[in-house]
Image (cartoon, rainbow, N blue to C red):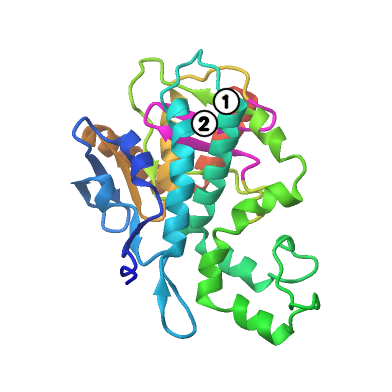
Amino acid sequence: MNSKPSIKHHFLPQHYLAGFTDDKGMFFVYDKVSGEIFQSSPANTFFEKHLNTVTFPKGNSSDFLEGAYTHIENESWGAFNKIKNSLKDTKIDLLDKMSLYFFLLCLYWRLPANISAVDNLSKISFEDDDALNYFTISRKDGGNAPKEFLDEIKNSLAFKKSLKLILPFAPFFKNKTWSDSIERWRFLFPADGKGWYIVGDSPIITDGVNDRDPMKCLENFIFPISGKTLLVNTNPPISQGFPPELVMEFNMAIIERSKRFVACPNKDWLQALIKYFDFYKSYNKTNTIIPNLFSGLSSGIL
């Protein structure tokens, strides 16, 4: 007999979140909605119940998407851990970068912040000129499926949830220059080797230009591999290290972009960051945080 579908589905994997915890596997979480700070663990945060549960027309449910994500994550952890544990002079193999790239694509489209974008993309699926025409449905005889049938599929919640796992393949089918982006990757490490970078429920900080484009969503982004390692992809690529201000401005971007939760192992540091973010809010300047961050990275004068 098949087991019941799982309930607790993390949109940020626990193994990833472990890179932002203390030596006891805990971190402090700030709730932007309530203003509260509480201590928790990766197992009990950054998840939604039944996020990847699919209910079919006959009423039966399946968590096959959750299983697919778990498989992808397990295949990615080897490369991820190499990069996570790297140092300033460590050479990162191209295959490890490619593995991380696909992991990031899968992570990007499952984030709560991108649910509305997935819904909008589902509405134009199966159209000749849409960005996802590498994924089609046809009749057994090779003919086109009826429009009514396709409309029923793409308007279903099951398809919208499944689309989150179809979108990550778009660059490989539609963007012949996807590998150019990886060549621009740079990894930054705090000078003191401590974990100053925080994590939030939307940790892939994009510049806002191609956020809804499945082929180019990761053309320019910043992502915390862990509290000690930051991945920066800009065009042109950064050519030098940056002063401590980068840490503060990146963390402001994490708080700004997060829909609700941010976390780090040091409560005092988290409180200091919140206070600094509130300063931006008091002057209605939170909308300048991310543009200024990318502008500073591009110019090298952050």
Q: In this view of the protein, can residue 292 be seen by the observer?
A: no
Is residue 189 found left or right of 163 in the rendered image?
left
Picture quadrant of residue 198 = top left
| Mark 2–mark 1 CB contact (< 8 Å) | yes
Disc 2: CA contacts within 10 A as few (<14), some (14-19) or many (>=20):
some
Q: In the rendered image of this protein, does residue 152 appear above or below residue 279?
A: below
Q: In this view of the protein, can residue 5 be seen by the observer?
A: yes
Which image quarter is the N terminus in? bottom left
Which one is earlier in the sequence, the residue at label 2 or at label 1?
A: 1
Which residue position is annotated with label 2?
A: 231
Picture quadrant of residue 219 = top right
Q: Residue at image x 23%, y 45%?
A: 41
Residue at disc 2, secondary structure: strand
Residue furthest to the top in view is 89
**Amino acid type, callout 1:** Arg
Residue sitting nearer the eye, 214 or 298: 214
Which image quarter is the C terminus in? top right
Q: Where is residue 89 drawn, in percent x and y? A: 51, 12
Q: Where is residue 93 drawn, in percent x and y? A: 58, 24
Q: Residue at image x 61%, y 83%?
A: 152
Indicate which disc residue 186 carries. 1
**Amino acid type, callout 2:** Leu
Question: Which residues are drawn in magenta?
Answer: 218-237
